[in-house]
Image: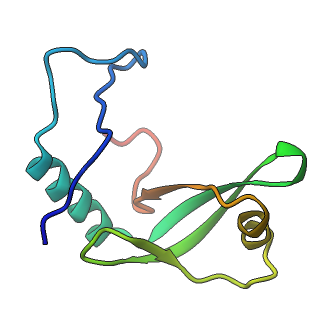
């Protein structure tokens, strides 16, 4: 399956758009697949009432098309937030990382 990776922007540590460097789609896809394969937890950020941020951790699954899925109770705050305001951000991370490890 060939994926289209759109809107890829490289930025430096200050948040400015990096010039002269463009990520190669096949290398980026390979890195994303490795991160998804090697990890099981994610942080889900939703918008609660009054515009307040809400973050929840969850286990996730993913498809070959790089679709991300999580299973949660429909009465949870983050699911209610998504029903009312269908936007979210998700961060996948390693739970084996320790603060200060390189």
Please say if 51 is above or below 4.
Answer: above
Please say if 34 is above or below 13.
Answer: below
Residue 4 % position (x, y): 21, 55
Please say if 44 is above or below 83.
Answer: above
Residue 7 % position (x, y): 32, 39
Q: How many marks?
A: 0
Q: Quadrant of residue 44?
A: bottom right
The quadrant of the picture occupied by the N terminus is bottom left
Residue 60 % position (x, y): 47, 75
In percent of the image, x 37 and y 20: which residue is there?
13
Q: Is residue 60 left or right of residue 84?
A: left
Q: Is residue 87 left or right of residue 21?
A: right
Residue 35 % position (x, y): 28, 60
The quadrant of the picture occupied by the C terminus is top left
Q: Quadrant of residue 45?
A: bottom right
The one of 80 and 55 positioned closer to us in this rendering: 80
In percent of the image, x 83 and y 44: which residue is there?
51
The one of 1 and 27 positioned closer to us in this rendering: 1
Colour mapping used in the image: rainbow
The one of 30 and 95 positioned closer to us in this rendering: 30
Toward the right, the furthest residue is: 50
Q: Quadrant of residue 2?
A: bottom left
In percent of the image, x 67 and y 61: which residue is there?
86
């Amino acid at each position: 399956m060939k994926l289209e990776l759109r809107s890829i922007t490289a930025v430096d540590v200050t948040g400015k758009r990096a010039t002269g460097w463009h990520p190669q789609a096949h290398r980026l896809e390979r890195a994303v697949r490795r991160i998804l394969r090697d990890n099981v937890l994610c942080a889900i950020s939703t918008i609660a009432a009054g515009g307040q941020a809400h973050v929840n951790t969850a286990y996730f699954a993913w498809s070959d098309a790089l679709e991300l899925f999580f299973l949660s109770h429909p009465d949870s705050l983050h699911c209610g937030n998504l029903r009312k305001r269908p936007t979210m951000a998700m961060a996948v991370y390693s739970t084996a990382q320790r603060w200060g490890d390189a």
